[in-house]
Image (cartoon, coloured by chain):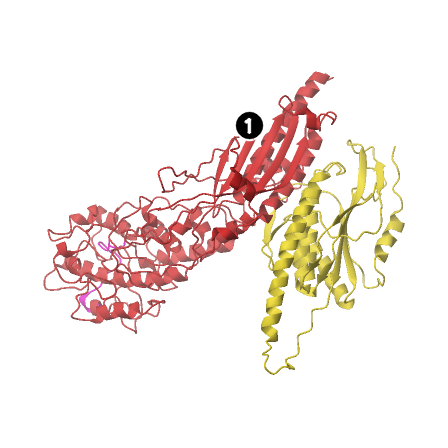
Amino acid sequence: MASPRSNLHQESTNTEQIITEFFAKCLHIILESRSPCAYSRNYSGEQTQSSPSSSSSSSSSFRPRDKWLNLALRDCVVDVILVRGPVDCDPVRCSPRRGLVKNLSVEELFPNFWNSGHEECLLEEKSEKIIERWVIQYKNQKSRDFTSGSKRSGGTSSKSLYKKSIVLLRSLYLTVRLLPAHKLFRDLNKSGQIHTYTLSHRVSSSVEPFNRREEEEMRPFNRTEVDTSCGRLCLSVLYRPTLSDLSLEPSTPISPQFIPDYVGSPMTDPLKRFPSLPLAGMVAHGSPSSFPFSRRHSWGYDIYKASQPSVSPSPSPTYSDSRALLSNLGSHRLPPVSLPRHPHETPSSSNVSLCHQYNTSFDEYWPSPIFSPSSSPSPPTHIPSSHPSNALLRCDSAPVSIPAARFGRSPGLPNNHIVPLAPFSKSSRPSSSQTDNSRALLRPGNIQTSVPVRKFSLGKDEVGNLPGAKISSNSSPQISISRSSSRLSFLEAFDDSEFPCPFAVDYDDIRDMHTRYVIQLVAYFVCLMSISEWVSLAVPDPYIYSGFDREPSRYENASDNRQGVTEC
Amino acid sequence: MNCEVCHLKELEVEHFEIREVLRWLRCFRIAPLILLGNLYKSFSSSSYASGLLCLQFRCYNVIYFLPEPTMLKLDAGILHSIVFHRALGPVRPKDVDSELFEITYVQCGDSNLEKKIEEKIDHFIGWVEKHPNKKSQVYSLLLPKLFSNKIERLYWEHWYVNLNVAQPPKAPSRKSHHSKVVVDPGESALEERNVRRTALEVSLREVLFQIIKFVNEKKDHIPPIPNLEGVSFPYEITIPSSSDSSFGMDMIKRMLQTGRPTMLS
């Protein structure tokens, strides 16, 4: 027969375990409802459950951890994201602790990561404002204040504690969805809007007191205490009741802008001499040195001859290249270029992942791809899922990869088709360098890598028929600049025979290889215009890129896009 | 022990909003209730280790002057809120964004429960349509099953949801007596509706905050949680039937049928 002492010890152990699980679930609930783009909604039926052997109903197959406190939550994934900002900026840090955590403070921060007044992609300002503070405390009996709760006899048994913890957790789950910050969370997860803010969080084990001003702005709610045999569990929240004074209105996406001085393929010398368009600001005639910027592509440098301009890219973020779709090359920008909605083809299998990355990046970084030389040829390895507000204004020189999959694969495309931008040409000789180049081509933001387009080959005759070469009104309706008349200007620039097109081909001066590359460049250029339209029409779905669970419909849409993009 | 009365703010909502609010309030143990009188039942049961089990009538004096669509929305939200707070078995919560309000409520993820609630709401809607401008009551009863040979209904908690469905305001006549005044009934009605809805949302949120607080204040009367998924406790949702002609009659009938709970020693 168990001794009272062993029972007490067992009771204490059970209580500590309940408290630990409670802490973990509270943190989980708070974070999943305040971390934009990190969690999918509607957990039911999304995850495949590993059915633990249980005597309970086998229909739902709750995992053991789901059964704790009878609240099944989604998987908790915490991204550690580097946020550029001032020196003293505090990137998101999360140090979840498990075990006998006595105090846990979760603060929902409200950092303003973006200064919309700047075109640069660097984070000029960063301000944080705490809009919620969740405090989960467990005070052991030793440190417990006996004056307030000493009258209660014996505290709560572990069974009763478990029951009350369940109720408390249910209330917490609903409370986080009632507070004003949840609206921000929902808005951030909505697509099609650009926000100048995001939600961040900071988990700490100590509570930093608010200053007087902050304290006046915060309001407590629902401080709940549960006495246990060993202490007291307390859950409280301070929240900012009004967020309207923080200027959180989402803004419409900025107009897609066209990089005027798109360098194009390094394989083509004439590309260096493209003049500046009236609106696009494309570089006019001149030596390569007249380029306003130079490219620094290791993969293209060898191909370029001495006249190859060293195009200096516009400031590029240190962020992943996959995000560097938009660049700001000088002050010349074109309005957005609309892209075709529906891809025509799928790329080869070798381009699947890259096109997906491209697709991902476009969805994230619409409104427009901006032609610019890429500052870094390395393909993106990860597409961060946070801070969508940074996406569109990450205007560096990273080129935009052209999803050749979306456009005609084979040569001899009809005029109403977008010229494919497949990184591979059927007739090209496969080589590792070309493969790398093609991969670089499909890398988001790296549109210049038009070089070895294996699956795409255009003959001379096709050049004239290329909708990209002569972007006329009868080109694919998918090519359109939806927002302004700059398309017409752009088209006019191409139509203007006296205006040397950057992709213009001088058949007399270039070799066969260069001819093909030039043709491909023109095609890519056209496709880029179409891509911008396509991106504008695509519904950015952060869930696609975060890799988290998501509704099947969303996943299917992403698959369709990806399928289309990868067609070459 | 007297009933606890919480005077909440009166809400004016449209009829089509009822369903949504009721759905949303399902998450909580709420409900606007009508005070039928102080009624307190207490009994002890040997099957409960906690000892005395108190049945409390949670009384909230909330009267919804609701246009029919709003009321229907409110019904669903309230019921889901109640059940979520009382379905203490393992659940996979499901967030549902309100169609009419900037509020997210939670469902238990139990399809059977949702279906049943929707059926009840539909019946309630039908009743409201047949009895316009009449106070209606939707209440859910939560009752445990005694672990004995004889199944007795012991209500350990009652929730009453009272709704007062108002007829939508008549559209102003297009003919204005003042020729100079240009009357646009469409825009004015829409604007009025938006204002009313915004006010309702704010009030509803306040009510829910208050209810959450109240829910956490009283936990001792909750019986031990059975090892069942989802809605672990039996529950019952009762709506006024078409034959009910008087307000609260159904409740009185139930009280008479249930009788006084026996004191288990």
- Chain A hue? red
Q: Is residue A206 magenta?
A: no
Residue type at mark 1?
Gly
> What chain does badge 1 belong to?
A
| Relative image position of residue A262 (x, y in whole percent) | 23, 58
- Chain B hue? yellow
Give the position of the C terminus of chain B as an image quadrant.
Answer: top right
- Compared to residue A415, the image places residue A249 above or below, namely above
| Relative image position of residue A381 (x, y in whole percent) | 34, 44
Drawn side of residue A61 relative to residue A500, left or right: right
| Relative image position of residue B153 (x, y in whole percent) | 83, 44
Q: Residue at x 63, y 39 (%)?
A: A169
Drawn side of residue A138 relative to residue B261, left or right: left
- Compared to residue A313, the image places residue B165 above or below, namely below
Circle 1 Cα neighbour tier, 10 Å, few/some/many (<14 / 14–19 / ≥20): few
Residue B56's image quarter? top right
Drawn side of residue A372 relative to residue A251, left or right: left
Instruction: Work out whether residue A189 can be spotted.
Output: no
- Name the main secondary structure of what is drawn in magenta: loop
Q: Closest to the observer: A365 or A42?
A: A365
Q: Is residue A454 magenta?
A: yes
Give the position of the N terminus of chain B as an image quadrant.
Answer: top right
Give the secondary structure at mark 1: loop
Drawn side of residue A564 relative to residue A486, left or right: right
Q: Residue at x 72, y 17 (%)?
A: A4
Instruction: Work out whether residue A327 can be spotted.
Output: yes
For the record, the magenta segment spans A447-462
- According to the picture, the residue beneath numbered tag 1 turns out to be A99
Count all numbered tags in the image, as a single digit: 1
| Relative image position of residue A256 (x, y in whole percent) | 34, 60
- Compared to residue A564, the image places residue A74 above or below, namely above
- Compared to residue A48, the image places residue A97 above or below, namely above
